[in-house]
């Protein structure tokens, strides 16, 4: 009886260890939020990162792509906004400087709940000011993907945006990883910029406008993706937030099928 009990116990422990060691192959999801936060200044002229964090937290994203982020500038009180938001949201920050500004820096950032395996950067030109792309490699469901945040040059009929779109499209074509591109592209659906990106990325057809925040009339903020085998977009929407920034946030939810 003792041998039998020991044998059964050993089998049970072995089965338990094997089940723990087996990687999960069920459904996984990835929630990506993109938001131009207007350096933390709302339409009421208040700098309020806690308000920004509250809006972000309300939709529970895994990765947040931010544009117009200040790092230790005078206007934002010397705060490193990416670090502060990461602290408020319990996420990991990555900042990408585009220009020096008011004694500090100004650019884009990514916040992530998921472990960041790598960081990639791409410099972009700009007639008005230099721009860039910052990307982090994360692996929801053990599938690596490069999530990128960018902010294309502004100004009416600015030719820099076409050049920037081509550089980003070429970068995506050469990437060995799937790419999710999120950001303020300052370009409307049907524009040359979107046509170039459409060569590589799937762009959701939802025409919901994102700017200006109080009464949106134009869609210039996007979340799009290149080849992402085994994953599909299951939800995308513009978050109804009319005050915290001059743009509204865009959420995209991806899900992996059973394999």
Image (spheres, grey):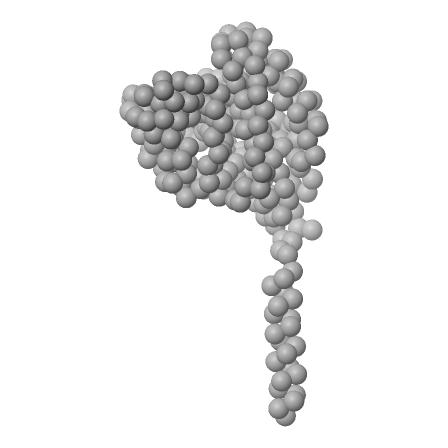
Residue drawn at x 38%, y 22% as measured from the top left: 104
Picture coordinates of residue 20, whole percent (x, y)? 60, 63
Q: Residue furthest bottom?
A: 1
Q: Quadrant of residue 231?
A: top right
Q: Is residue 139 above or below residue 252?
A: below
Residue 139 seen anywhere in this rendered image of the structure:
yes
- In the image shown, does 27 or 12 lie closer to the viewer? 12
Quadrant (top left/top right/bottom left/bottom right) for the N terminus: bottom right
- In the image shown, does 73 or 205 lie closer to the viewer? 73
Residue drawn at x 62%, y 76% as measured from the top left: 12
Residue drawn at x 35%, y 23% as measured from the top left: 73
Picture coordinates of residue 94, whole percent (x, y)? 48, 34
Residue 243 seen anywhere in this rendered image of the structure:
no
Q: Quadrant of residue 182?
A: top right
Picture coordinates of residue 215, whole percent (x, y)? 40, 20
Residue drawn at x 54%, y 28% as measured from the top left: 134
């Amino acid at each position: 009886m003792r041998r039998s009990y020991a044998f059964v116990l050993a089998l049970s422990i072995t089965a338990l260890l094997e089940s723990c060691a087996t990687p999960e192959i069920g459904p996984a999801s990835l929630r990506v939020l993109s938001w131009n936060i207007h350096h933390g200044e709302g339409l009421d002229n208040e700098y309020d990162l806690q308000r920004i964090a509250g809006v972000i937290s309300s939709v529970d994203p895994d990765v947040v792509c931010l544009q117009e982020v200040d790092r230790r500038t005078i206007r934002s009180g010397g705060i490193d906004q990416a670090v502060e938001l990461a602290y408020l949201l319990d996420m990991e920050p990555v900042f990408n400087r585009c220009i020096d500004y008011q004694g500090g820096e100004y650019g884009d950032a990514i916040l992530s709940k998921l472990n960041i395996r790598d960081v990639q950067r791409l410099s972009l030109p700009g007639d008005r000011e230099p721009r860039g792309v910052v990307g982090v490699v994360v692996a929801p469901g053990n599938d690596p993907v490069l999530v990128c945040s960018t902010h294309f040059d502004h100004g009416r009929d600015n030719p820099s945006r076409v050049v920037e779109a081509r550089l980003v499209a070429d970068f995506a074509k050469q990437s060995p990883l799937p790419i999710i591109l999120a950001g303020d592209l300052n370009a409307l659906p049907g524009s040359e910029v979107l046509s170039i990106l459409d060569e590589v990325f799937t762009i959701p057809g939802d025409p919901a406008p994102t700017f200006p925040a109080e009464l949106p009339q134009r869609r210039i903020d996007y979340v799009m993706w290149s080849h992402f085998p085994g994953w599909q977009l299951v939800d995308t929407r513009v978050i109804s937030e009319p005050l915290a920034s001059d743009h509204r946030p865009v959420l995209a939810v991806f899900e992996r099928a059973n394999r």
